[in-house]
């Protein structure tokens, strides 16, 4: 996920005392822009002569960012030195650490290993706790979509069966003539198996080329459609993201190709068997 920084970058936090960079959606909800003031309330009581009051601090908006996810409406950045002043910490102190990994799937294990090496009692959380339900739902949807695609391939294989059965019915006389010329039942069967395999391979190649091309460009295509018709299919206020991501997994492509080929070969067996059972005398009786 690539962040888009508007008008200012994080370096502006070093140039401005008590500056803040807001998520684009958060800035929109607050109705502020670069140069405006916002007031932050800390969950900490300040005891004074006037009584107990929350800690308030006004910040200057020095920039906004957008990553196309829910973070745009819930995240803000300030300089660590300003945060230390508010919390009355030393500049090198920190309340929490956020660690990123190249492989996000190792985070649930690695984060605990790191926490055990840090002295004291630490509260640990990872993305499986905060967004685990979302990814579980996506995994379930992926499984269901895979099942639906498998059914679509099965329907296509059934079309191959029906096509070859019609070919066998239409070519009974030709098959009988070939049999009388010395072609064996096994050879007739292989003729129709090869024909079905050719049809299946041609469809698989066309499907793979078009599917890979679409998978590599679907995000740009959806963005272009949204811009052209001025519509928003995904809204970060409702969903976790406001764009349609796509990642091509060649392992999935290989699985689909192999499955399609196996189903295609299986679909040719019955029509080829029927063709091999054509009796020349019966087929040519009325010719």
Image (cartoon, rainbow, N blue to C red):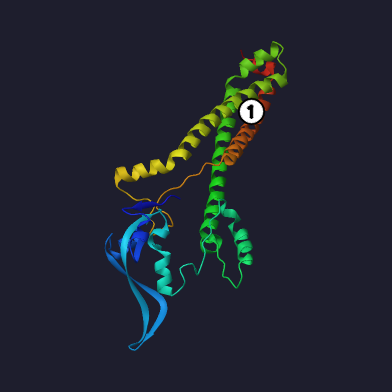
* Percent x, y of residue 185: 72, 20
Residue at position x 36%, y 54% in the image: 9
* Percent x, y of residue 174: 62, 15
Q: How many marks?
A: 1
Residue 156, compared with residue 74, is above or below; it is above
Disc 1 secondary structure class:
helix
Q: Is residue 110 left or right of residue 208?
A: right
Residue at position x 44%, y 57% in the image: 240
Q: Is residue 22 left or right of residue 280?
A: left
Residue at position x 47%, y 39% in the image: 216
| Furthest-top residue in this view | 181
Residue at position x 59%, y 31% in the image: 161
Q: Which residue is mark 1?
A: 271
Quarter residue 281 falls in: top right
Quarter residue 45 falls in: bottom left
Disc 1 residue crowd, few under 14, some 14–19, many 20+, Cα 10 Å = many
């Amino acid at each position: 996920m690539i962040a888009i920084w508007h008008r200012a970058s994080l370096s502006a936090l070093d140039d401005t005392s008590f500056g803040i960079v807001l998520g684009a959606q958060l800035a929109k909800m607050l109705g502020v822009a670069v140069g405006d003031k916002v007031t932050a309330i800390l969950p900490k009581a300040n005891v004074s002569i006037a009584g107990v009051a929350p800690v308030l601090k006004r910040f200057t908006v020095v920039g906004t960012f957008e990553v196309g996810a829910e973070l745009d409406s819930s995240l803000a950045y300030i300089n660590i030195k300003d945060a230390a002043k508010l919390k009355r910490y030393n500049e090198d102190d920190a309340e929490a650490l956020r660690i990123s990994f190249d492989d996000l799937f190792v985070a649930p294990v690695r984060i605990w290993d790191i926490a055990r090496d840090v002295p004291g009692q630490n509260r640990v959380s990872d993305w499986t706790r905060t967004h685990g339900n979302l990814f579980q739902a996506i995994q379930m949807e992926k499984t269901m979509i895979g099942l639906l695609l498998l059914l679509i391939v099965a329907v296509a294989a059934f079309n191959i069966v029906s096509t070859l059965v019609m070919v066998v019915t239409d070519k009974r006389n030709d098959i009988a003539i070939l049999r009388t010329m010395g072609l064996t039942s096994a050879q007739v069967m292989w003729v129709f198996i090869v024909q079905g395999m050719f049809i299946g391979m041609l469809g698989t190649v066309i499907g793979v080329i078009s599917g890979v091309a679409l998978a590599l460009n679907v995000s740009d295509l959806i963005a272009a459609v949204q811009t052209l018709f001025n519509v928003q299919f995904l809204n970060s206020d409702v969903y976790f993201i406001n764009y349609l991501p796509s990642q091509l997994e060649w392992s999935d492509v290989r699985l689909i190709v192999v499955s399609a080929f196996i189903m295609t070969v299986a679909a040719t067996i019955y029509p080829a068997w029927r063709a091999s059972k054509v009796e020349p005398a019966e087929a040519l009786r009325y010719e």
